[in-house]
């Protein structure tokens, strides 16, 4: 296992738009230099054993997948305004405890929220009533046929995003391997 906070220096990657570090053997907290990636729009950090707080300093982020992290913690956030552009938020399988956080009400562009396999108690907060982008059985608002078209488009984007992430991850791994070899030699 590698401590994520000491593994990468992202400070020179200000144009980085998509990053996938998911399903690696990282642990710990996010490195502060990740916040230097001001252009980051899609970030997948699923299944890497993060702990502490959910990052909020990346203002352009529209897709954030943090599933299977933060085991048995209360869902914290530093600044409630930090995710104003989030459209897709994946926090499933984290075993979060406590109430569904009220700061989620600030995510007015949210279209997909994934919260299964957590240990929330209480009811769904009324704050979701004002978000016209959310629909489905849980919030008791049926999705319109037009919404289903959007869902198909969203699925196509997610499929593209996964392929893109795999390619970008491969390129990043090659870059770090070549960089590592240059330091070793």
Image: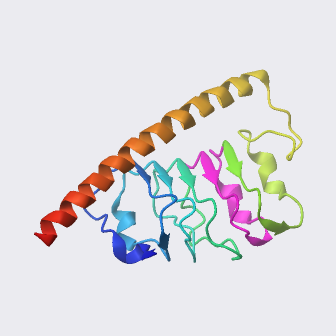
Q: Is residue 96 left or right of residue 120?
A: left
Residue 119 in percent (x, y) is at: 81, 68
User: Measuring 71% from the left and 76% from the top, which residue is drawn there?
Assistant: 72
Q: Magenta span covers which residues?
A: 85-110
Question: Against 13, is 6 above or below?
Answer: below
Residue 181 in percent (x, y) is at: 17, 64
- From this viewpoint, is residue 15 visible? no
Q: Residue 100: which quarter of the image?
A: bottom right
Question: Against 101, is 43 above or below?
Answer: above
User: Measuring 73% from the left and 70% from the top, which residue is drawn there?
Assistant: 96
Q: Is residue 182 left or right of residue 140?
A: left
User: Measuring 57% from the left and 29% from the top, which residue is drawn there?
Assistant: 156
User: Measuring 35% from the left and 58% from the top, which residue is drawn there?
Assistant: 37
Viewer-nearest residue: 127 or 55: 55
Viewer-nearest residue: 128 or 66: 66
Residue 115 in percent (x, y) is at: 73, 56
Question: Does the segment drawn in magenta span residue 93?
Answer: yes
């Amino acid at each position: 296992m590698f401590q994520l906070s000491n593994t990468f220096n992202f400070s020179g990657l200000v144009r980085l738009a998509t990053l996938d570090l998911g399903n690696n053997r990282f642990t710990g907290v996010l490195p502060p230099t990740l916040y230097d990636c001001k252009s980051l729009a899609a970030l997948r950090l699923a299944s890497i054993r993060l702990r502490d707080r959910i990052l909020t300093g990346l203002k352009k982020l529209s897709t954030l997948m943090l599933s299977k992290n933060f085991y048995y913690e209360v869902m914290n956030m530093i600044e409630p305004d930090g995710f104003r552009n989030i459209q897709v938020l994946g926090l499933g399988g984290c075993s979060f405890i406590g109430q569904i956080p009220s700061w989620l009400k600030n995510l007015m562009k949210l279209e997909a929220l994934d919260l299964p396999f957590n240990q929330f108690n209480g009811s769904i907060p009324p704050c979701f009533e004002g978000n016209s982008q959310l629909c489905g059985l849980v919030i008791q608002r049926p999705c319109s046929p037009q919404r289903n078209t959007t869902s198909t488009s969203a699925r196509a984007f997610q499929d593209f995003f996964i392929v893109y992430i795999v390619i970008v991850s491969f390129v990043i791994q090659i870059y770090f391997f070549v960089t590592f070899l240059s330091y070793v030699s």
